[in-house]
Image (tube, rainbow, N blue to C red):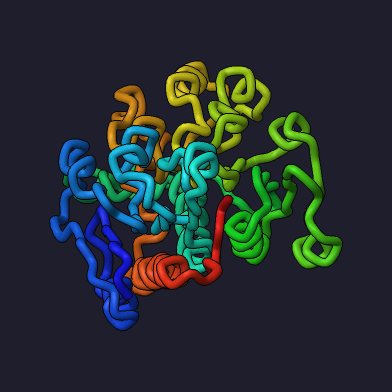
Amino acid sequence: MTAKVVVTGKIPQSGLDVLANAGITVTAWTNDEAISRDELMQVVVGAEVLVTLLTEKIDAGVLVAAGPQLRAVCNVAVGYNNIDVPGCTHRGITVTNTPGVLTESTADIALALILMVTRRLAEGERVIRSQTPWQWGMNYMLGSAIQGKQLGIIGMGAIGAATARRASACGMSIAYTNRRPVSAELERELAATNMSMKDLLTSSDVVSIHCPSNESTFHLLAEAEFALMKKSAFLINTARGPIVDEAGLVLALEKGEIAGAGLDVYEHEPVVHSGLLNRDDVVLLPHLGSATEETRSAMASLAAHNAVAIASGGVPLTPVN
């Protein structure tokens, strides 16, 4: 196969093997650090298929630099807010993502954040690691139980549903808001209640974000939304950072409008709002949602299979546009 495929970030060998086994000659970025903008603009020239990571912004400038022969951008992520999808569609360029393969690992992180922030686990570990004096006591470092509490899911897709299953097994009731109601079968399985955004925010003890990041969800949760939440409620975000107005979140925490937050993604990633860094009521992770060897390997393989399908004139497995 003679198609020129450019991999713009370092991916697991499984993905490169898929491309090699298809007979494709690949130009691949092999450094651990993300490719620079200048280097990206150079390496994409002449590419017919790009295999990209969320650290690369594939905008109009990159599409023009690549040239008119570019046929596809295959993102190694379920989200694709790093790609100008309308611009790709306008140019007849297919965009693909990697849904499904990271569902369970991301849901694990969502549940972990729920437990960490409600039970003050990160705060407790810092006490031990800093060798701060402590003594067991009936009132020492009390957290909040999740049993009998309501988890509000914003975006009941695959990851939202997987998170709901885990929370339900821990004794939480499930509410959700979605663009459209989920199937009756899934509602019965999860004993889930469909609510408006306002009702979900006002009634939930934990709110977990699982919707895509796009223009309609930018700052979906900001000052007005935090003001609706219970003062005892917690926010969890394992989706994408721009869905949350971080400045608004800091203000809500400072005013005591919510009890805490667990975040795996950030509005200006990898930069984190300084107002979050020194708060014991916030748990911060460095975007670990899909960070297992098995999941990252499966993501790279799926993206590569999409690239092979398009390069050979076939139909991609997981098209976005």
Q: Is residue 285 shown to the viewer in this render? A: no
State the residue at coordinates (39%, 58%): 76
Relative to 240, residue 296 above or below: below
Where is residue 258? Give x, y as percent: 56, 28
In this picture, residue 213 sits left or right of residue 125 = right
State the residue at coordinates (22%, 44%): 40
Furthest residue to the left?
31
Which residue occupies the foreground of this view, 262 or 185?
Answer: 185
Please identify the quarter of the rendering in which residue 206 is found.
top right
Where is residue 20? Give x, y as percent: 27, 78
Please identify the quarter of the rendering in which residue 82 is found.
top left
Relative to 100, residue 146 above or below: above
Give the position of the N terminus as an image quadrant.
bottom left
State the residue at coordinates (73%, 54%): 173
Q: Is residue 149 shown to the viewer in this render? A: yes
Where is residue 195? Give x, y as percent: 80, 40
Which residue occupies the foreground of this view, 66 or 16?
Answer: 66
